Image (cartoon, rainbow, N blue to C red):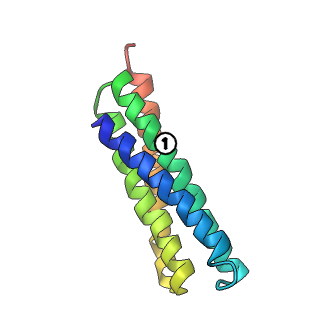
């Protein structure tokens, strides 16, 4: 499982860099400054949590157990819900998508809590 989380983290980081470049170059003249800022927040959180998936892959090998696995799943859910909803909001202007964003934020918080739990519960 650690290889899957590591590979997915690396791929999501690559896509985050690509999205950031796309936003900075292709979208700069097409989005309002407010919507460009929303897009940039989505990129930032995707990149941070892509790196968190790399940490999860390491944590699984260091502190085996379900808590680190849950952290990885929650980080993925957070990227999809938080960053995904913000990307769609910025690109479509559909404000109702903003209602999904907090669920992604909660997933991120729960993921970090699970990662902390994995470390604190370990006997190593």
> Count the marks: how many?
1
Q: Residues within 10 Å of mark 1 (few under 14, many from 20)?
A: many
Residue 30 placement: quadrant = bottom right
Residue 118 horizontal/vertical position (percent): 39, 29
Q: SS class of the residue under badge 1?
A: helix
Name the residue: 38% across, 40% down: 6
- Tell me, yes or no, if residue 67 can be seen here: yes
Residue 71 horizontal/vertical position (percent): 39, 42
Residue 32 horizontal/vertical position (percent): 69, 84
Q: Can you say whether 15 is above or below 32 in the image?
A: above
Q: Can you say whether 97 is above or below 58 in the image?
A: below
Name the residue: 45% across, 68% down: 84
- Tell me, yes or no, if residue 42 can be seen here: no
Residue 98 horizontal/vertical position (percent): 51, 76
Identify which residue, 70 or 59, lies in the foreground: 59
Residue 115 placement: quadrant = top left
Q: Disc 1 designates what residue?
A: 52
Q: Quadrant of the N terminus?
A: top left
Name the residue: 54% across, 65% down: 19
Name the residue: 35% across, 30% down: 60
Identify which residue, 54 or 24, lies in the foreground: 24
Q: Can you say whether 107 is above or below 82 in the image?
A: above
Extreme-top residue of the structure: 124
Q: Quadrant of the C terminus?
A: top left
111 lies left or right of 69: right
């Amino acid at each position: 499982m650690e290889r899957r989380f590591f590979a997915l983290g690396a791929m999501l980081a690559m896509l985050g860099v690509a999205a950031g470049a796309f936003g900075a170059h292709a979208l700069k003249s097409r989005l309002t400054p407010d919507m460009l800022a929303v897009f940039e927040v989505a990129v930032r959180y995707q990149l941070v949590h892509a790196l968190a998936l790399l940490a999860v892959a390491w944590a699984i090998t260091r502190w085996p157990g379900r808590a680190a696995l849950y952290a990885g799943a929650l980080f993925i859910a957070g990227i999809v819900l938080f960053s995904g909803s913000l990307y769609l909001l910025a690109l479509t202007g559909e404000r109702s998508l903003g209602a999904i964003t907090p669920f992604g934020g909660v997933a991120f918080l729960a993921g970090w809590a699970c990662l902390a739990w994995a470390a604190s519960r370990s006997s190593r």
